[in-house]
Image (cartoon, rainbow, N blue to C red):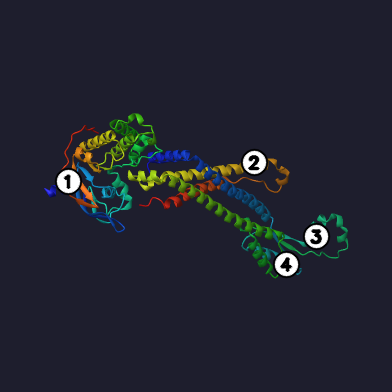
Amino acid sequence: MKTGLSLFFIKRAFQDMISNRFLHIVTIVTIALSILIVSAFGLFYTNINEIMMSWKKGVKIMAYLNKDVEKIQLPELKQKILSLYGVSSVLFIPKEEALEKLKQQMKRQVSLFENLKENPLPDVFEVRMIPSTQNWGKVEILAAQIELFPQVAGVEYGQRWLSRVSGIFNLFKFAGTAMCIVFFMASVFIVANTIRLLFFSRREEFEIMRLVGATDGFIKAPFYIEGMIQGAIGGLAGILILFIIYFVITSNVDPGISSGFFTMRFLPVSTSIGILCGSMFSGWLGCYLSLKQFLKY
Amino acid sequence: MTENKAENAIIRMFHVHKRYGKKNALADITLDVEQNELLLVTGPSGAGKSTLLRLLYFGEALTEGQILIDGMNLSRISKNRIPLVRRQFGIIFQDYKLIPTKTVYENIALVLEVKGEKTRFIQKKVGSVLRTVGMEERINAFPPSLSGGEQQRIAVARAVVGDPKIILADEPTGSLDSESADVIMSLLKGVHDRGATVIIATHDKEIIHNTGGRVIYLKDGCLMEPPMPEPQTDKKKTITL
């Protein structure tokens, strides 16, 4: 398309939007609300995901060894565990060190340890996973693999509750995705309806345009531009409103609550651009669906 | 002689039929229109005059037969070429068909915009045709604020602005007073004098008598011998475009 012609269509699109401003404002507000809801979900997801990641980083598997395991067997066993998929590090904690740690942690109940004839704790391998391979299913599989070694008496991977939280989070992710699809479709149908109304109200004008030799593309082009402008303005407004809400909330939250735990962040620029593009695409698609049924010879 | 005529024909119709259900709107029309010919299509209401014109600019598809416009067979062209066919015509309607929400300038400029002409050229050309039809002072007016005669002058300006080879006028004076009708007919004769082929559908006997040109008579969709004597040309003022 020639630059001059593109400018002509853009100019015509803006002229049309100004002359039918009420209908366009209603559409833009509706798109903005849809985008606000979708991007609010995105913001929540981004931050929850970060919290989950920070929790997951703490996941470790404790492999308790049998009492009859000889020290000489330890390097070979360590090497075998290290060779398993997803393992990043293996740390051997001798039972003496474990007891010392326990005593330090239970300083007030130190009398409990005075009458011990022998160390009741076993030697332990502390196994940590590569962060990128962490999900609860893989932790379980790895734990089961370690437990199969004859030298290992048992395994424990704490924070089992994380599994439940992870499940809820996945459910939330699924519901959120479904919600995004619903709102995307809502935006598409709203734009389609606006364009349909506009087209219907101006059908005589388009008939005249066709009689003087206008192609379908010539008639449709400004509508596509209008749809995309509606999507862009609606998308920008939605993200802007969310940013204001985010700003107000983060300004009023005590920084001490989250500082050691995680820092609340706004949507990454790439996600915001993605949402904006999605919004523009919904405008374009709405036009496409609406105009598809018109302009038939 | 006939061969010469055929070679010179810009429009050729062969056994053209148009039916709406079982009703024959046009039946077996065979007709040649030469380049730079002034053709008057007449006949009573419902005779098929407007249908004939609509078939030419692809306002409707024909049922049977063939139409050649400047060598292009309308039955064989693809849908996306229809706008290109229409650009060869300047069309004038009884009800003007101006876009009420666009100014006089915008209505006329549209013809050149669809062709992708540059703005400067469009401005120059629209200004020129508006001067010709004597409406340059109403360039920013909207059609509803104009009288019927003024609106039809704008319609003529729109029809000629793209320098089409063929002008089709469907009852161009049908809703005008005699003075306005004279102006419109003078404009159309001016377009014809400049080299365009002009086809006018009308049932106004005075126009038929005064305009000159070939007359064909339609009745019940069929070409017939005119029931009236050959029109006498009454030379009137001609506005040259």
Label 1 chain ID:
B
Residue behind mark 1: B8
Q: Which chain does the numbered disc 4 sit on?
A: A
Q: Is residue A123 left or right of residue B163?
A: right
Disc 2 vs disc 3: which is toward the camera? 2
Q: Quadrant of residue A52?
A: bottom right
Indicate the secondary structure of the residue bearing disc 1.
Answer: helix
* Numbered marks: total: 4
Q: Which chain carries label 3?
A: A
Q: Which amino acid does label 3 sit on?
A: Leu
The numbered dot on residue A100 is: none
Disc marking residue A154: 4
Residue at 21% x, 43% y is: B39
Of badges 2 and 4, the one in the foreground is 2
Crowdedness near tag 4: few (<14), some (14–19) or many (≥20) residues, C-alpha within 10 Å? some
Going by the numbered disc 4, the residue's amino acid type is Gly
Q: Which mark is residue A99?
A: 3
- Taking the view exactly as shown, the residue that stands out farthest to the top is B137
| Whether residue B180 is visible | yes
Residue on which disc 2 sits? A247
In the image, taking residue B214 as reference, residue B172 lies left or right, namely right
Q: Are marks 1 and 4 in contact (CB under 8 Å)?
A: no
Q: Earlier in the sequence, mark 2 or mark 3?
A: 3
Work out whether residue A116 or residue A264 is closer to the camera in this orientation and state it: A264
- Mark 3–mark 4 Cα distance, whole angstroms, equals 18 Å
Tell whether label 1 touches label 2 (CB within 8 Å). no
